[in-house]
Amino acid sequence: MNSNSKTSNQQNDSENPFVIKKWKAVGTWTWDVAHDDVCPICKMLLVDRCLGCQVITEEECVIVWGDCNHVFHNCCINVWAKKTPRSKCPVCQKRWIIARTTS
């Protein structure tokens, strides 16, 4: 190794004190659908069954609208309501009151 390459390596080391030994790329993606068609809790399409219903039962999920006009899978909002002390809508934080349902 000649002295010129040694000095250039020493200069590069002093300019770049960090060495990347391993690099893993991470990407994100989203569904290309309107947000009105997705349950805000489980992020599944409202026309599909939620993850809980896919595992537990073969029945379709019941869709629930609140007084605030936000829409959820019934089982998703039930789990949310049990965890939330005053049963508030997870989107707008208003008191959760069921306005209508459909199956």
Image (cartoon, rainbow, N blue to C red):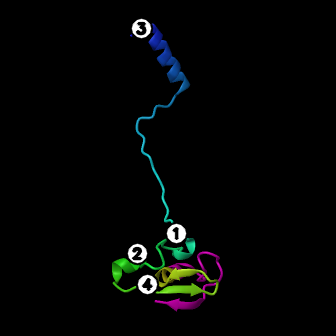
The alpha-carbon separation of the residues under discs 4 and 2 comes to 10 Å
Whether the residues at callouts 3 and 4 have beta carbons within 8 Å, the answer is no
User: Disc 2 residue type?
Assistant: Leu
Q: Secondary structure at mark 3?
A: loop
Mark nearer the N terminus (2 vs 3): 3
Residue behind mark 2: 51
Quarter of the image where the N terminus is located: top left
Residue behind mark 1: 33
Number of residues whose C-alpha sits closer than 10 Å to that of mark 4, classed few (under 14), some (14–19) or many (20 or more): many
Q: Nearer the viewer, mark 4 or mark 1?
A: 1
Q: Secondary structure at mark 1?
A: loop
Residue behind mark 4: 61
Number of residues whose C-alpha sits closer than 10 Å to that of mark 1, classed few (under 14), some (14–19) or many (20 or more): few
Q: Secondary structure at mark 4?
A: loop
User: Disc 3 residue type?
Assistant: Asn
Which is more toward the observer, 78 or 46? 46
- Left or right of 1? Residue 31 is right
Image: magenta residue range: 80-103
